[in-house]
Every structure is written in structure tokens, then in C-alpha cells.
Amino acid sequence: MTDIATRIDRAFAPLTQAVQAARIPGGVLGVVDRDGHRALRVIGSAQLVPEKRAMTETTWFDLASLTKVLFTTERVLALADAGTIDLDAPLTSVLPDFRQYNPDNWERKVTFRQCLGHQTPFPAVFPLYTYGRDPDLLRTFLLQHEWQAGAAVYSDINFILLGLALERLDGRGIRAMDPGKGFAWSADPKNAAATEDCTWRHRVLVGEVHDDNCAALAGAGHAGLFGTVDALLDFAVGKLRGAGPDALIRTPLSARRTHGWERPYEGWSGGEHCSPDTIGHTGFTGTGLWIDFARGHAWTLLTNRVHPTRHFDSGIVALRRSVGDQINAD
């Protein structure tokens, strides 16, 4: 059986090439097995502008959409396991005011499970942050906006709504909730990977959330979590050992998705060589985590590929697949 040191050495090669080609500033790669043995590799810069800083093994990353699986999915499934919510009940069982002025609309029929699996007609993207900067008003807007139904696609709206349900049940905003061991809702700029030179916040974002809608909402269920490579590997070890609501995160809801997570399909981010019993998820900032239960190992690739701008072909899609293929080649 190939050891994790060999796997990470192979997988570090395409990351090294991406940094040397100036496609991404830097990255951290980590691999861990079920017994907790791990290997880490680091390369490049955590920040390029307005100053340059080296990437380290302790660099904190804006995990972006990994928030969906590391925080929101975990909380929703724990509440379901406790009997607090019914996954097949509509969101209105917790958010009775959702689209309250039109009780017969489709939005009021959307369930928790459908949101977890992105099986709803919500749009893929929506620039909520352009509607104002008042978080409470934006939450009200989300709940009363007449959404145009379309084909079921991956949509942040699903997890923003799940986040609103968590806030309603907990009686406080998401940023006031415990983000989980090793995670936080912000990071020290001196030890955080920089993201974008934001056009509407007029600064390079370091240690504060990159996602526009999450920033405008002052915390949301789809983005905003920060963590280090060790925090992600610790989370993965817990899953490999069976901690938490594992049955559902491994239970398919569609050809591409489980509850919260993705599962292997042709062209997916984890590459072609992982087992069918693998789950994974990516984040827009250049992050990702994949857990292969059959092989008994997991890997995370953390980059700052949007620094200093998202409007550049970083090659992150091909890089993720190449890393996954090298990790799982036997």
C-alpha cells in the first residue's frame, strides 16, 4: 500500500508547477489517514500585494464554500438527529415568514434536505450585496424576494437560507456561534492568506471574508469560515473514524451530491482515481477537502488563487483534479 508521504510528494508536483508558473501565489497541501498520520507541503506566498509574505503550515485560509460542509451541514444534520428539525419538512417549519405574502408559492415548499442537496430552483448566483449593507434588511429581503424558478443547480441561496434557519433556532447570528474546533470567523491578517483586492470594499482582503454576500450579511451559512490545514485534516480524521452524522454525508441525493457534499462523477474536482465512496467540496477562494472512506485517507488543497484578483485563469479546476489523481494513484 502506498504511504501518505509518497502520495503527497507526487501531488505536490502539480502545485509546485502552478506556483512557479505564477498561476497562483501559493498553497498548502495536506494528506491524512484514518490513524491520524499526516504529511504537509507548503509553497509560495500568502500575500503578494501590497506586501509579500511567505506561506506557512500555520497560515489561515478563507475557506469560502467549505463553510457549507464544515459548519452548516454539520449543524443541520445534528439538529435533525436530535429531532429539532425534520429534513423533509419545508423551511417554513422554522422560517414561517419565508415568502409569507404568497402562501401558495414554490419557495414555501422547499425542504431542508432539498437545500442540502442543491435540489431547488433557486438561481446559481445572486448579487445580494448590491442591494445594501444593512444585514437585517438583507435577511428580510432574502425571505421576501420573489425568486425566479429555474433548473436545479448548485446555489448559495440554499445554504444562506439554511443559515437563516440556524440563526432563528439559535437566537443569534452565525458569527456568534461556535465555528467548531480549529476554525474561526476571521483570522489575524499577519498569519492569513490574502484574497482579493476588493472593488467595493476598496482594500486587499486579509483575514476577513472574501465572499461578497457573506460580508454584506455579516455572516451566513454558505461562506465565512477560516481554518488551517491541520484543522481540516483533524475534521477529516473524525469523519474517517466515524464521528458525527456520517451516514447522511455519504448518502447520495443525486448523481453528483450527498447531503451537503459532492460525490464522484466524471470530471469532478477529486480526480478520476478516488473510490466511489469519496466525498468532497471546494471553495471559491481556492480551497478544497476530499475524504475517501474506502481508501481510508483524506486530502486538502488550500490556495489563495483569487489573490489579488478573481479575474484571472488560475487553472484551479485542472490543478485540483491533478492533485487528486496523484494522491490516489496506486
Image: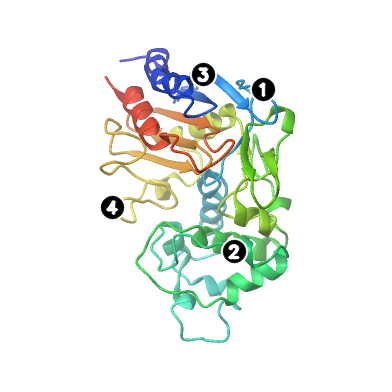
Which sits earlier in the primary sequence, circle 3 or circle 4? 3
How far apart marks 2 and 4 lie (CA) works out to: 29 Å
How far apart marks 3 and 4 lie (CA) works out to: 32 Å
User: Which amino acid type is marked by label 3?
Assistant: Leu
In this view of the protein, which residue sits in the foreground, 2 or 218? 218
Question: What residue does disc 2 label?
Answer: 128
Secondary structure under the numbered disc 3 in the rendered image: strand
Query: Which image quarter holds the N terminus?
Result: top left
Contact check, label 3 and label 1, Cβ < 8 Å: no
Question: What residue does disc 3 label?
Answer: 40
Question: What residue does disc 4 label?
Answer: 255
User: Which amino acid type is marked by label 1?
Assistant: Arg
Query: Which image quarter holds the C terminus?
Result: top left
In this view of the protein, which residue sits in the foreground, 106 or 216? 216
Question: x%, y% of residue 21?
Answer: 45, 22
Q: Is residue 274 left or right of residue 41?
A: left
How far apart marks 2 and 1 lie (CA) works out to: 33 Å
Secondary structure under the numbered disc 2 in the rendered image: helix
Which sits earlier in the primary sequence, circle 3 or circle 1? 3
Query: In the rendering, which numbered label is found on residue 53?
Result: 1
Query: Vertically, is 255 above or below 24?
Result: below
Which sits earlier in the primary sequence, circle 2 or circle 4? 2
Which sits earlier in the primary sequence, circle 2 or circle 1? 1
Disc number lying in front (3 or 1): 1
Q: Residues within 10 Å of mark 2 (few under 14, many from 20)?
A: some
